C-alpha cells in the first residue's frame, strides 16, 4: 500500500516512515502544507497520515480540500491537541481516525491496518489470476487457498501488477509503489525483484510479460 505522510517534525516523520516501510508499505513524506496541497491534488496513494499543525497550510485545511473534491482516501489526523472539541472538529472535517501525540507506533500501525481493511471492503476484496488469489486488505497471496510466503518487496510488485488489471506498469511506477515517489533507488532494483518474482510465480502458470520501454504485466499461461 502507498501512504502519503504529511508531518513537519523531521524526526517523527522519519520514525513513522521507517516503521511503515518495514511493514511493506511505500511512503511519500512531505513537511509543508502548501507543498502537500499540490501533491495531494494529483497523488494516488491509498491512505493519508496528516499532521494538523503544519507550516504553509494546516492539516484541517488540507483535509477539507480533499473532501471538497470528493477524494475518498482514508485520512488519519495526528495532533498534540487532546481536547475533545479538537477531535470533533477533525472528524467533522472528514478524518477517518485521530491520534494524539505522543503515540505508540504499534497503535498507528493498527489504525493503518484497520483503515486498509475498511477501504478494501468498499472495493474489490480479492484479485484473481489463474490459481492465485490476492487479498487486498490482508496483502496476502495464496494459491488454491493456501497462503504463499512472498518477501514484502516482491509482494508489493505483485500487488501493483495485479491491480493494473492487465495493463502494463512501467518500471518507474513499480519503483514508486514499492519505495514511494522520489525515493533514491535505481530502477534496476526492480529488475532484480521481477526476476525473483517470475521464479516464484512460474509453478502456478503465471508469467510476467515485459516490453522494453513499456513495462510489465501479469499473464496467465493457458493450460496451467
Image (tube, rainbow, N blue to C red):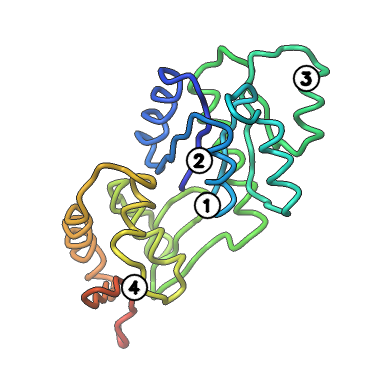
The residue depicted at 50 percent of the width and 23 percent of the height is: 8
Report the Cα–Cα distance between label 4 and label 3.
Answer: 47 Å
* Residue identified by numbered label 3: 86
Q: Which mark is residue 218?
A: 4
Report the Cα–Cα distance between label 1 and label 4.
Answer: 24 Å
Mark 2: which secondary structure?
strand
Question: Which is closer to the viewer, label 4 or label 3?
Answer: 3
Q: Could you tell which of marks 2 and 4 lies nearer the N-terminus?
A: 2
User: Is the C-beta separation of discs 3 and 2 under 8 Å?
Assistant: no
Report the Cα–Cα distance between label 2 and label 4.
Answer: 27 Å
Q: Which mark is residue 4?
A: 2
Question: Which is closer to the viewer, label 1 or label 2?
Answer: 1
Question: Which is closer to the viewer, label 2 or label 4?
Answer: 2
The residue depicted at 52 percent of the width and 38 percent of the height is: 35
Q: Nearer the viewer, residue 62 or 178?
A: 62
* Residue identified by numbered label 1: 43
Horizontally, residue 11 falls left or right of residue 61, namely left
Q: Position of residue 138 (x, y in %)?
A: 49, 48
Q: Is residue 129 above or below residue 37?
A: below
Report the Cα–Cα distance between label 1 and label 3.
Answer: 27 Å
Picture quadrant of residue 19: top left
Amino acid at each position: 500500500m502507498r501512504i502519503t505522510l504529511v508531518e513537519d517534525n523531521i524526526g517523527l516523520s522519519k520514525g513513522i516512515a521507517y516503521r511503515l516501510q518495514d511493514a511493506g508499505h511505500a511512503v511519500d513524506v512531505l513537511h509543508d502544507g502548501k507543498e502537500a496541497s499540490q501533491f495531494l491534488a494529483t497523488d494516488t496513494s491509498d491512505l493519508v497520515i496528516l499532521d494538523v499543525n503544519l507550516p504553509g497550510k494546516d492539516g484541517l485545511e488540507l483535509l477539507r480540500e480533499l473532501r471538497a473534491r470528493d477524494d475518498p482516501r482514508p485520512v488519519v489526523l495526528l495532533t498534540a491537541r487532546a481536547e475533545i472539541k479538537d477531535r470533533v472538529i477533525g472528524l467533522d472535517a472528514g478524518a477517518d481516525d485521530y491520534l494524539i501525540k505522543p503515540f505508540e507506533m504499534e497503535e498507528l500501525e493498527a489504525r493503518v491496518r484497520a483503515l486498509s481493511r475498511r477501504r478494501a471492503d468498499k472495493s474489490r476484496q480479492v484479485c484473481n489470476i489463474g490459481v492465485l488469489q490476492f487479498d487486498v486488505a490482508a496483502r496476502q497471496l495464496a494459491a488454491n487457498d493456501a497462503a504463499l510466503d512472498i518477501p514484502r518487496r516482491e509482494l508489493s510488485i505483485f500487488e501493483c501488477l495485479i491491480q493494473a488489471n492487465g495493463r502494463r506498469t512501467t518500471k518507474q511506477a513499480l519503483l514508486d509503489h514499492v519505495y514511494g515517489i522520489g525515493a533514491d533507488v535505481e530502477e534496476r532494483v526492480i529488475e532484480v525483484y521481477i526476476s525473483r518474482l517470475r521464479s516464484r510465480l512460474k509453478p502456478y502458470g503465471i508469467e510476467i510479460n515485459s516490453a522494453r520501454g513499456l513495462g510489465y504485466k501479469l499473464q496467465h499461461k493457458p493450460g496451467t
